[in-house]
Image (cartoon, grey):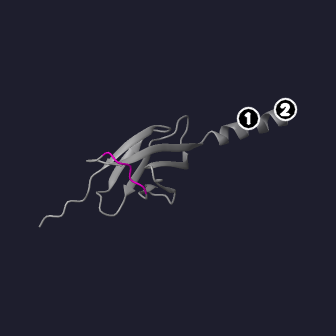
């Protein structure tokens, strides 16, 4: 019985080192407010990614180290003809991202 308790305590201690980060959001055009579908949303320094749906919504989940709390998730949002955005998202927050069209100087 004592060995069982020790094993359970050890398992709990080691399982607390990781957390599931979740970032939810919507990407819209900064001028029109219309949703942007097909934008690529990627966690920095990771392969974890998502793509916005036709209404501009995305959800990105990732496992991260974090003792006692989940750290902020750093994400990059990119789409052709728009300026890229680099953001820090607190765990489990929902964000609204307004992408600006890339300006081309003549």
Secondary structure, mark 1, is helix
* Residue 35 within the magenta-colored segment of the rendering: yes
- Residue visible at 36% across and 47% down in the picture: 87
CA separation in Å, label 2 and label 1: 11 Å
Q: Residue 26, percent across and down?
A: 42, 45
Provide the residue span drawn in magenta: 33-37
- Residue visible at 78% across and 35% down in the picture: 6
Q: Residue 33, percent across and down?
A: 32, 45
Residue 88 appears left or right of 101: right
Where is mark 1, residue-wise?
9
- Residue visible at 44% across and 44% down in the picture: 25
Looking at the picture, does residue 20 appear above or below residue 69?
below
Query: Looking at the image, which is closer to me, 95 or 68?
Result: 95
Where is mark 2, residue-wise?
2
Q: Residue 96, percent across and down?
A: 38, 42
Going from the N terminus, do you reach mark 2 or mark 1 first?
2
Residue 14 appears left or right of 28: right
Marks 2, 1: nearer the viewer: 1
Name the quadrant containing residue 95: top left
Pointer 1 local density, CA inside 10 Å: few below 14, some 14–19, many at least 20: few
Residue at the bottom extreme of this rendering: 106
Quadrant assignment for the N terminus: top right
Quadrant assignment for the C terminus: bottom left
Give the main secondary structure of the magenta stretch: loop
């Amino acid at each position: 019985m004592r060995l069982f308790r020790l094993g359970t305590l050890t398992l709990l201690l080691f399982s607390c080192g990781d957390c599931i980060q979740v970032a939810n959001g919507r990407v819209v055009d900064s001028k029109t407010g219309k949703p942007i579908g097909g934008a690529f949303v990627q966690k920095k320094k990771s392969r974890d990614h998502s793509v916005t749906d036709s209404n501009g919504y995305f959800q990105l989940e990732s496992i991260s180290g974090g003792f006692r709390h989940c750290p902020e998730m750093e994400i990059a949002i990119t789409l052709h003809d728009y300026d890229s955005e680099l953001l820090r998202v607190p765990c489990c927050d929902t964000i609204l991202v307004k992408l600006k069209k890339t300006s081309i100087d003549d």
